Image (cartoon, rainbow, N blue to C red):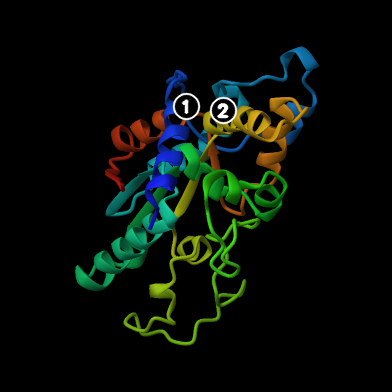
Amino acid sequence: MLTNANARNEKEIMQTFNRRQFFSSAAAGMTAMGALSTLSPAAQAQLVYTAKDWKVEEFNELAKNPARVKQVYDVISIGGGKFLNNIKNSLNGLHFGFGVPAEQIKIVAALHGPANFLNFDDFIWSKYQIGEFFKVEDPLTGKPAVRNPYYLSKTGARLEHASSDPNNADSIYQDTSMQALQHRGVTFLSCHTASEEQARLLIKHNNLTAQPEEIVKEMLAHALPGVLVVASMVAAIALLQTDGGYSYITVG
């Protein structure tokens, strides 16, 4: 649970993000790294992706997924990762409680604001001291996290759980790691707009000399496996609802 001080810190950071205008362009997919590297220095600031900059088709496939039940979780606050437990409960409730086949459930976690950093690997968390910046404690050390503590399953990369009983805490059905949830079909989205804004905050917070686009390019190169980078999360959520029929859920 967040302390009052930590909650204030996240609130102030989210307010910084919200001051900037979000542009309503079509949302989705991850831009090829080469597109950035071939730009001239004067053109490298890509605050806004346009449709030609990324794989719109991949996002459209996600929006039009034919599953019977589709949910999009709008997540801004890291909040100790408690939203991951909510997603786990959605999957279990729909499948075991209501009898919806697992393949007929599609859940999307739309991470922006501070939560966007959950989409990146340990390299980014260590280099830019994300745990210290956002007051995220590593449960293994009790210190500010220098790794992404929300991604890997406690069972290891091979997801070898001790039980298949959904009531057993050691089963995949009670595993709230991003890795386990991805294995169960959850798609995590990362916001390009948020990454651009966060690069500028990291430069200011850490007194860096790097240019914002250098940091953004590095962040995108270290996105977690399976993460889909969208142009603008607020636009992506709107399209998932209107074009895809996803129900909207936000967690505080």
Vertical position of residue 8 compared to residue 137: above or below = above
Report x, y in % for residue 170.
44, 82
Which of disc 2 and disc 1 is earlier in sequence?
Answer: 1
As drawn, 149 above or below 239: below
**Residue 146 in the figure: left or right of residue 151:** right
Distance from Cα at disc 1 to Cα at disc 2? 9 Å
Q: Position of residue 171 (x, y in %)?
A: 42, 80
Which of the image's four quarters has the N terminus? bottom left
In-front residue for pair 102/46: 46
| Residue at x-position 31% and y-position 47% | 252
Residue 187 pos. (x, y %)? 46, 52
Query: Answer yes or no: do the residues labelled 1 and 2 have beta carbons within 8 Å?
Result: yes
Residue at 68%, 30% in the rendered image: 203
Q: Position of residue 224 (x, y in %)?
A: 61, 52
Up-down: is 133 above or below 104? above
Q: Residues within 10 Å of mark 2 (few under 14, many from 20)?
A: some
Identify the secondary structure beneath mark 1.
helix
Q: What residue does disc 1 label?
A: 16
Q: Which quadrant holds residue 165? A: bottom left
- The disc placed on residue 197 is 2
The mark lying in front, picked from 1 and 2, is: 1
